[in-house]
């Protein structure tokens, strides 16, 4: 049952959890829906880990599983794996000094990564999970995590260095 | 950054994350001291890592999971569907201070907190009396009756409790055990954990959902039965998506003898 300990643990990871949802989903509304759904499921669950570390893994896994379920339901898996149509806004000219714009640029570049790279980078860099934890959470070998993290960062660096920061169409519900 | 191999990237990336063994980390550090391209790439990885971490600075949405405020306080129609299930994402703040045997100490729950003793007293007065029974004009929510009837408890009493302002619904089991449910106003847009306590034979369960605060009171009821009733009612009030049949099945499975 979701008791005081779990609420306390949840408070400690809310932002990271939501950031992870945003990393998985292509628009904020879908991320909010996913995040809220995950919390509702968590609060309704019968067996909720009480420990901080185990709760954190459990919560991220729950959210990710919901995301996968949603993808299956919506039959959009292939669409997600396909790069979105891009609209070049590089002429907007990010200065590199404005933290808001930087964050926007990072997010835009990040969302152009493949699903696998977004997933693993979000868990490591946003969620703060170790490679071992990420491997367990995703059900893949640790070496694969290491490889994906590296490739994701290289791809992200290429996007940013080359000024290839572009916006994607904002379509409600696109995961 | 030319001349670097994919394996270099992996080692550097893992180095940035502190994921290398001591030997491998020393090997990378040695190369970093001699290869400026490698050092620049490591700096790039650190920059990206920090930038991604900052994405978690955005606040999580503080909006209800489900917004379904009841239109009428006691005009409930379908099971659960007429009950607010507003689970605010920050509800944990409300309940982190809750401890067993108390309603908590947060200001948001103060109204309910100060009401508990008087409501328990109302329960005791009713439990010791022969009546009065169902009051006119005060109808129990359908979901409430349905759930409790599934556990062998019949609604026999309803009355307004003037101080504090609450509605009192009394249920009786086959062996004359008495269970009271009090519904009172609660701070809006709150939701949270179910708190069950047992103290010297007095059993209470409380939770807040939407604009309503709930308090279940019994004395000497089988603990499993009381907990089952409390849990089911809490879920019914909160989770609009929970299947009603499943809940009734849960109640039936946990049905115990009324020992009171």
Image (cartoon, coloured by chain):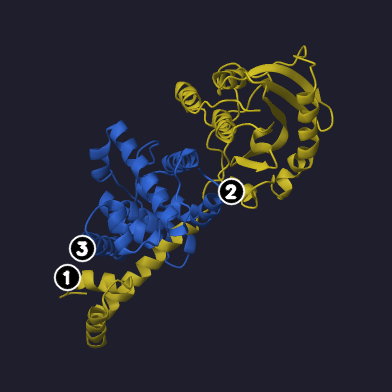
Chain colours: A blue, B yellow
Tell me residue B62's x, y (percent). 56, 45
Judging depth in this view, the residue of B52 and A88 nearest the camera is B52
Tell me residue B218's x, y (percent). 68, 31
Name the residue located 51 percent from the left edge and 55 percent from the top edge.
Answer: A9
Name the residue located 28 percent from the left edge and 35 percent from the top edge.
Answer: A72
Judging depth in this view, the residue of B177 and B50 nearest the camera is B177
Q: Measure the C-alpha gap from mark 1 to mark 3.
A: 12 Å
Q: Which quadrant would residue A106 be assigned to in this image? A: bottom left
Judging depth in this view, the residue of A146 and B161 nearest the camera is B161
| Residue B20 visible to the viewer | yes
Q: Which residue is mark 3?
A: A143
Q: Residue furthest top?
A: B136
Label drawn at residue B92: 2
Tell me residue B202's x, y (percent). 70, 38
- For the residues beneath circles 1 and 3, the answer to whether they share a chain is no
Name the secondary structure under disc 1. Answer: helix
Q: Which residue is mark 1?
A: B7
Relative vertical location of residue B201 with respect to residue B178 in this rendering, above or below: below
- For the residues beneath circles 3 and 2, the answer to whether they share a chain is no
Q: Which quadrant would residue A67 be assigned to in this image? A: top left
Chain letter, disc 1 residue: B
């Amino acid at each position: 049952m979701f008791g005081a300990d779990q609420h306390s643990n949840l408070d400690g990871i809310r932002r990271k959890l939501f950031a992870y949802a945003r990393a998985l989903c292509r628009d904020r509304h879908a991320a909010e829906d996913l995040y809220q759904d995950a919390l509702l499921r968590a609060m309704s669950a019968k067996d909720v880990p009480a420990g901080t570390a185990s709760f954190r893994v459990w919560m991220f896994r729950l959210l990710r599983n919901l995301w996968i379920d949603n993808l299956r339901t919506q039959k959009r898996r292939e669409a997600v794996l396909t790069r979105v149509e891009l609209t070049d806004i590089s002429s907007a000219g990010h200065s590199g000094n404005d933290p808001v714009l930087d964050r926007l640029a990072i997010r835009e570049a990040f969302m152009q990564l493949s699903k696998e790279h977004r997933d693993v980078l979000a868990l490591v860099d946003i969620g703060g999970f170790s490679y071992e934890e990420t491997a367990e959470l995703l059900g893949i070998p640790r070496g694969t995590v290491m490889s994906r993290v590296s490739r994701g960062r290289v791809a992200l660096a290429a996007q940013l260095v080359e000024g290839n920061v572009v916006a994607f169409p904002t379509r409600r519900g696109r995961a | 950054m030319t001349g670097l191999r994919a394996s270099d990237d992996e080692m550097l990336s893992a180095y940035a994350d502190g994921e290398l063994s001591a030997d491998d980390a020393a090997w990378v550090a040695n190369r970093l001291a001699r290869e400026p391209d490698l050092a620049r790439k490591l700096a790039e990885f650190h920059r990206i890592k920090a930038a991604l971490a900052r994405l978690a600075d955005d606040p999580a949405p503080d909006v209800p999971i489900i917004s379904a405020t009841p239109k009428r306080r006691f005009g409930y129609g379908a099971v659960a569907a007429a009950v607010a299930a507003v689970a605010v994402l920050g509800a944990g703040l409300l309940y982190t201070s809750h401890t067993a045997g108390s309603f908590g100490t947060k200001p948001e729950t103060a109204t309910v907190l100060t009401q508990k003793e008087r409501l328990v007293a109302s329960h005791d007065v009713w439990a010791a009396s022969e009546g009065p029974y169902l009051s006119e004009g005060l109808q129990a929510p359908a979901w409430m009756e349905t759930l409790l009837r599934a556990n062998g408890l019949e609604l026999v009493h309803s009355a307004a409790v003037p101080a504090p302002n609450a509605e009192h619904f009394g249920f009786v089991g086959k062996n004359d055990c008495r269970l009271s449910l009090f519904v009172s106003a609660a701070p809006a847009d709150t939701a949270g954990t179910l708190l069950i306590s047992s103290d010297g034979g007095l059993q209470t369960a409380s939770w807040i959902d939407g604009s309503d605060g709930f308090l279940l009171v019994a004395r000497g009821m089988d603990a499993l039965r009381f907990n089952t009733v409390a849990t089911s009612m809490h879920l019914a009030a909160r989770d609009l998506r929970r299947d009603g049949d499943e809940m009734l099945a849960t109640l039936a499975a946990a049905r115990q003898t009324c020992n009171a």
